Amino acid sequence: MKNIFVKTSIAVVFASVFFGSCRPKDTADAVSGDAAQKVYVAPGKYDEFYNFVSGGFSGQMSVYALPSARLLRVVPIFSVDPQSGYGYSEESKPMLNTSHGFVPWDDQHHLDMSQTNGEVDGRWIFANANNTPRIARVDLKTFKTVEIIELPNSAGNHSSPFITENTEYVVAGTRFSVPPDNSNGDVPINTYKENFKGYLSFVKVGKEGQMDIAFQIETPGVNWDLSHAGKGKSHGWFFFSCYNTEQANTLLEVNASQKDKDFIMAVNWKKAEEYIKAGKGKKIAAKYVHNTWDEKTHSAKSEMRNEVLVLDSKALKDICYMIPCPKSPHGCDVDPTGEFIVGSGKLAALIPVFSFDKMVKAIANKQFDGNYDGIPVIKYEAALHGEVKKPGLGPLHTEFDGRGNAYTTFFVSSEVVKWDIKTLKILDRHPTYYSPGHLMIPGGDSRKPFGKYMVVYNKITKDRYLPTGPELAQSAQLFDISGDKMKLLLDYPTIGEPHYAQAAPADLIRNNGQLKFYKIEENHNPFVTKGEKEAKVVRKGNRIDVYMTSIRSHFASDNIEGIKVGDEVYFHVTNLEQDWDVPHGFAIKGADNAELLIMPGETATLKWLPKKVGIYPFYCTDFCSALHQEMQGYVRVSPVGSTVPLTFSLGTNMPAK
Amino acid sequence: MYKLTFFVVAFLMLTSCGDKTKTTDDFSKDTAAPTDGSATSTTDAATYDPNRGIGKHTSVDLGAKLDVAMAAEGEKIQSVKCSSCHKLTDEKLVGPGWKGVTTRQKPEWIMNFITNPDPMIDKDPELQAQLELCLVRMPNQALSDTDARNLLEFMRKNDGVK
């Protein structure tokens, strides 16, 4: 027994020596010896985390698994997706409708997962559209975009879609202040100070996730940049960073960098709710759409809304307070306790950390330094917990590990820096390749981070991978942060330009009731075909509705005649399969459209406008069985005025002569 | 004893770089209850019962006469979930025709096969032979036990049971 103890002690000493030797000596490129082992997930095994990554200018969201960095899926949200038919099928088109009509693309920056009691809960993930301001909700049972709400009075919805700790609200903000929608927008651009306004939107999230704009706060015209909700003790408050408090309307690069400090605005949304109850809100006319996806009809609908409730930040006291923050702040991050608010000035060489308790005290004691366009400005020192001195150049974003540490990315000095939130001491720094934007720790903006891994999303890739011409994929870097020092484990390319990301333990998502197929009995699509007996082709004027089924491996019907040039043909394809992972595709020659990819039990519709006489083959695009290559059919298109009768059949060959 | 020391040292070396929390295995497939029967069959060829097949149906009580109501329900399901591939005659479409199936196969075998096709196709000699002819594995059409029983009744009707 004693012998075992001695030997174990020797082992521990040995281990300590090895631990020391694992530290990279040259941080420029050293990857410790066991990095490969830490990211290796054997074939057939699952990863530890789902990682949801914003797609930036791709408009979509990619889903990776960590630590292997295997790409699981790309979920279409704000851009059309020809591979799934999203935005091309008749059923999905309304999802991309806006007050400007059908918009096929957007710039998707940030994601925030739903939370319960400040912990990620794996129900939904919210996504912002920056260009044509919208918020989307993706259901994590189906990995499908199920709702999109447009934001009136807004432009450049950047400080979004951050949520409160029980998912009471998801917020949005105006990065490009503009004249409100119901005002005359035909004004000279240089009347910015007078006519342009910033709006912050608070979108209520219902029990089933349904979104509804509860209220907007009208603020002076500035650039609202990022935000995060208070949590724990600061629940009830929201913090928004802003720049361009100079209110410049041209050459912002110079003109919006004049002031030494801009602001983080603290918004007391519980107070705002009281004002609304007291009838202090004003309903103003505004046109914006609300799009919802119905999983029973497999269809989206788009509804126009006509008014929105607005609160005035100037007139209504005690809702909004400005906290001065150095040098055009960007990231605005709240630590897991809710006490510390970290502002990251893009041009600063320090990180200010504000204290919620001190802020509340400063407000009570009226420690103000005047006001900004009617909004009280709290004295910088009165709200300040302290500054992280000489952390690096160009701080952008901060995440937390739940052990009292913060991690901040530095764009200019291209590094990630670990520091202690309370003492503000720098604990470690690691170069990144190159120039990081956002970073992500699973649950890292919640009350309960899972501080094992950190992913840093870099803006510049250069020489990290084999070259692919002028355009390179953006790079992500995975770190092990479970020890004292950050350890680089893996580099990997990404889809679009990732901005913010989220992650959750794999079990939380995969055990949330993942849908495997749609029950055919519950398919209420108005054009469903429940069984081949119901397959038919119906003409009404020049509109042709093809009620079609697909199953391994044929379509019913697969011979259709009597279609004429100038007809409007709708293929309503119902996938009769009732098993996991058996989608069927549908494509027809010459269609100025995409394909359909139809999940088991689902119905989807492709519109086709035949323009020339001839025979048009259609086929299944998703390899479905050994006889997949046989899964095809023909449509005969005759000239205008033809007398070829409308017929449809399956399995009927020409009679023998 | 030396062996033990070696293992302890090796273990600490592997974990000495700060990985103190869970390993990837904690979220591996092994920890989850199987969600379907497809890949989890433990039956091997030696224990396979070709009369019963693989599945939860061990004995099915058939009435002496046809249950007309059940057969009618079964016919509805057949038209949505089965008719794409099976004719009611003995003619092959994608899969074999249904005529005579209830006289060729035991009711337990039919119930198990239509509710649990994948493991049975992997094991059953007759189904393996059939697969060589049809080349399409019969899909799992997510039939409930009631659906399956009603379908069986419809198959009996199709085979002339009154």
Image (cartoon, coloured by chain):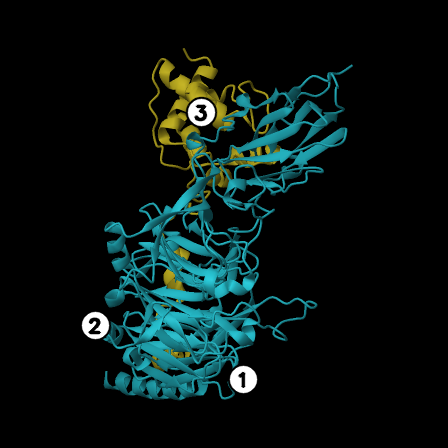
Chain colours: A cyan, B yellow
Foreground residue, A107 or B98? A107
Labels 1 and 2 positioned on one and the same chain? yes
The structure residue drawn at horizontal position 46% and vertical position 20%, both measured from the top left corner, is B103
Question: Label 3: which residue?
Answer: B77
Position of residue A465 measured from the top left corner of the image (x, y, whole percent): 62, 72
In the rendered structure, the answer to whether residue A259 lies left or right of residue A597 reads: left
- Chain containing mark 3: B
Question: Label 1: which residue?
Answer: A28
Labels 3 and 2 positioned on one and the same chain? no
So how many labels did they put on this image? 3
- Residues at marks 1 and 2, CA–CA distance in whole angstroms: 49 Å
The structure residue drawn at horizontal position 45% and vertical position 20%, both measured from the top left corner, is B75
Please identify, in this view, whether the residue under mark 1 or under mark 2 is nearer the observer.
2
Question: Label 2: which residue?
Answer: A364
Foreground residue, A485 or B20? A485
- Residues at marks 3 and 2, CA–CA distance in whole angstroms: 70 Å
Precedes in sequence: disc 1 or disc 2: 1
Amino acid found under the numbered disc labelled 1: Ala
Please say if A17 is above or below A185.
below
